[in-house]
Image (cartoon, helix red, strand yellow):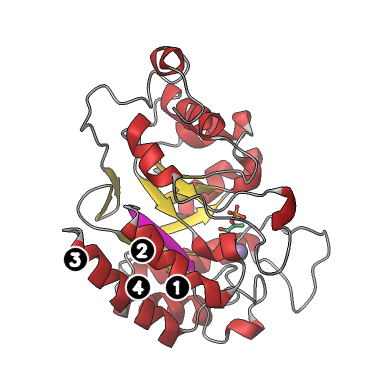
């Protein structure tokens, strides 16, 4: 067993643990079901940059088959400095995301980092993202759970599967079963290079299945940090059985306000969607 004991499953992880071998939770986000036959692709800009931009991106990713719109209004930026090139739109960004979601019919997922802003974010989005850095921010998990909104729980890059499922257990313990796990790469001492910032733990996809009924998606954008590496890892994730993907998409990736190295342009995203659609088909799934 990876790092989880039978005793953990019966006590510490009693709510996320499977009770039957084939038990699966289907998480509904608006009209989209995550964890079933469809592989749900969430796509959009790393950071919301303007109303027109996010509305356009939403329409374009939808045309290529994305089922949810992602975008950051509040960003966990590594350094405290903001300027006209690197910024976050905060409340305004949430309003633009909501408008883009309504215009396209795509449910919206966005991150909340601050326990004081949970209500505000919940009022604007269909699914709340807990970022990797906040995976074990237990007061934040409790407040987010209590909104009743579906939650996308990213794995911290230093977290074991046991830690990650423990964080999910907090959400279920606070009466929210609509939890989707998101693998976004783990760090090892030798990985902090431009060519391997994080390593995607693809083995965790079948491991998640082994232990829990919750769906699991993979984010190759924030894991690889490098746009040329995103399509191969996205294809591998779908082949490994992921229930969805999270992909950064930007009209002019090099000019993105945040994470300019990893976003795909519309054409690359469209090509990737055709490829993952074919891979999903082999596995009896759809995109
Ligand atoms: C994001 O999805 O925008 C993000 C910041 O991801 P992570 O928490 O995985 O770094
Ligand atoms: Mn990002």
Q: CA distance from mark 4 to mark 1?
A: 28 Å
Q: CA distance from mark 2 to mark 1?
A: 13 Å
Q: Is residue 43 above or below residue 27?
A: below
x and y percentages locating residue 282 in the rendered image: 19, 64
Q: Are marks 3 and 2 in contact (CB under 8 Å)?
A: no
Q: Earlier in the sequence, mark 2 or mark 1?
A: 2
Instruction: Find the magenta span and give its range.
Output: 243-247
Q: Is residue 177 above or below residue 6?
A: below
Neighbor class of circle 1 (other Cα within 10 Å; few <14, some 14-19, many 20+) is: many
- Does the magenta run of residues contain 223? no
Q: CA distance from mark 3 to mark 2?
A: 15 Å
- The circle drawn on residue 86 is none
Q: Is residue 84 left or right of residue 260?
A: right
Please tell me whether mark 3 or mark 2 is closer to you in this view: 3
Question: How many tags in the picture?
Answer: 4
Kindly state the secondary structure of the residue where label 2 is placed: strand
Residue at the disc numbered 3 = 281
- The circle drawn on residue 231 is 1
Q: Main secondary structure of the magenta part?
A: strand
x and y percentages locating residue 147 in the rendered image: 45, 37
Q: CA distance from mark 1 to mark 3?
A: 17 Å
Residue at the disc numbered 2 = 41
- The circle drawn on residue 103 is 4
Q: Is residue 45 left or right of residue 40?
A: right
Q: Is mark 1 within 8 Å of ligand 2?
A: no
- Does the magenta run of residues contain 246? yes
Kindly state the secondary structure of the residue where label 1 is placed: helix
């Amino acid at each position: 067993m990876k790092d989880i004991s039978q005793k953990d499953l019966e006590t510490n992880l009693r709510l996320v643990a499977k009770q039957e071998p084939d038990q699966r939770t289907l998480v509904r986000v608006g009209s989209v079901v995550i964890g079933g036959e469809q592989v749900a692709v969430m796509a959009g800009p790393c950071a919301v940059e303007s109303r027109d931009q996010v509305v356009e991106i939403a329409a374009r990713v939808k045309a290529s088959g994305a089922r949810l719109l992602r975008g950051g209004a509040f960003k966990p930026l590594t350094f405290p400095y903001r300027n006209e090139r690197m910024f976050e739109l905060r409340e305004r960004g949430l309003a633009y995301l909501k408008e883009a979601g309504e215009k396209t019919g795509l449910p919206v997922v966005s991150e909340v980092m601050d326990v004081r802003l949970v209500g505000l974010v919940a009022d604007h989005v269909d699914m709340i993202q807990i970022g990797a850095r906040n995976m074990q921010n237990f007061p934040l998990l409790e407040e987010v759970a209590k909104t009743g909104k579906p939650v996308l729980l990213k794995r911290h890059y230093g977290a074991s599967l046991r830690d990650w499922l423990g964080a999910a257990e907090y959400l279920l313990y606070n009466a929210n079963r609509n939890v989707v796990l998101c693998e976004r790469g783990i760090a090892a001492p030798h990985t902090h290079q431009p060519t391997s910032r994080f390593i995607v733990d693809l083995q965790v996809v079948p491991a998640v299945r082994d232990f829990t009924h919750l769906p699991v998606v993979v984010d190759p954008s924030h894991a690889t940090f490098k746009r040329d590496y995103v399509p191969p890892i996205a294809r591998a994730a779908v082949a490994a059985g992921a229930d969805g993907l999270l992909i950064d998409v930007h009209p002019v990736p090099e000019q993105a306000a945040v994470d300019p190295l990893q976003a795909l342009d519309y054409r690359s995203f469209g090509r990737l969607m055709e490829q993952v659609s074919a891979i999903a088909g082999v596995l009896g799934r759809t995109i």
